[in-house]
Amino acid sequence: MNHNKFAGIGMTSQRTRSRLVERLREKGIKEESVLNTIETTPRHLFLDEAMAHRAYEDTALPIGLGQTISQPYIVARMTELLVDSGIMGNILEIGTGCGYQTSILSKVSFQVYTIERLKQLQDKAIERFKSLELDNITYKHADGFLGWQEHAPFDAIIVTASPSNIPEKLVEQLAVGGRMLIPLTVEGGHQELILLQKTEDGMEQMMIEKVNFVPLLQGTVT
Ligand code: SAH
């Protein structure tokens, strides 16, 4: 990756990143390890040049092919909800996209497994992981509905695109005591971020807040 084209942004980005972290604190993010990781992760490197100047705004932005980079507040909130469990061994992420959430997770966990159905986005994300020297990320080009049986059970599963039903395979692949975060499309078409906790006897579910993710698409990968 050519870092030079970002040089201008790089010089000011540390200041704007600190401002973003202040905003996240105001919005209620408390976990210091998460805030610190956001402060030290160059979000502008996850965007195309034309969008990079908006990297430290607290908004979702387009990354091509109809997909988006998640809003920093949502990335922080979801990561905080997982870190709060106290178990950050093996994490499964569905929907690598540009790889920003993946990179944040890689800093606060032992190993991240991430699945993306669009090869073009995945290839760019892999380049970013390499240039940022993140070596605890394992990736796969596949349909995330199926999870990743080979590496199950996972301590945490984070789904960053919205299905209408909770994929059964993902529940099966979650460890007992593990947490899953999933933005579920509910009746009326809006989305609710659900926190699922797998117990010895079943599942506990909690609605966290309304969210707005791209759809989780089932079937053919491209
Ligand atoms: N985690 C990203 C947000 C990704 S947007 C971030 O950090 O900003 C959601 C991604 O999910 C898109 O890249 C989309 O292609 C992918 N996706 C949608 N359906 C999928 C599926 N069934 N399996 C894997 N990835 C999927």
Image (cartoon, grey):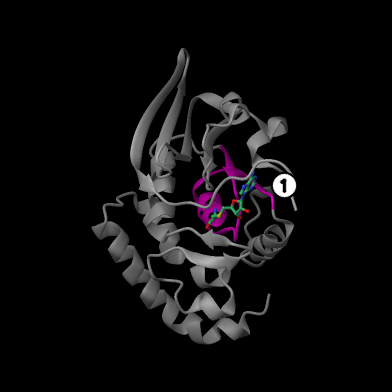
Residue that extends furthest to the bottom in the rendered view of this protein = 8
Q: Is residue 66 magenta?
A: no
* Disc 1 secondary structure class: strand
Residue 140 in the image: state x and y as whole percent.
Answer: 72, 47
Figure check: 59 above or below 174: below
* Residue under the point 64% across and 49% down: 136
Residue 139, relative to residue 42: is it above or below?
A: above
Q: Is residue 213 left or right of residue 206?
A: right
Local crowd size for mark 1, using a 10 Å CA cut-off: few (<14), some (14–19), many (≥20): some
98 drawn magenta: yes
Residue 56 vertical placement versus 144 (above, below): below
In this rendering, position of residue 177 left or right of residue 96: left
Which residue carries the number 1 mark? Answer: 140
Q: Quadrant of residue 169?
A: top right
Residue 126: x, y in percent?
69, 60
Q: Position of residue 80 (x, y in %)?
A: 39, 46
| Residue toward you, 146 or 4 | 146
Q: Is residue 78 left or right of residue 30?
A: right
Q: Quadrant of the N terminus?
A: bottom right
Which segment did they paint magenta? 90-117
Residue extending farthest to the top is 201
Residue type of the residue flagged with mark 1: Lys
In front of the other: 143 or 185: 185
Question: Can residue 130 be spotted in the picture?
Answer: yes
Quadrant in the picture for residue 90? top right
Residue extending farthest front? 188
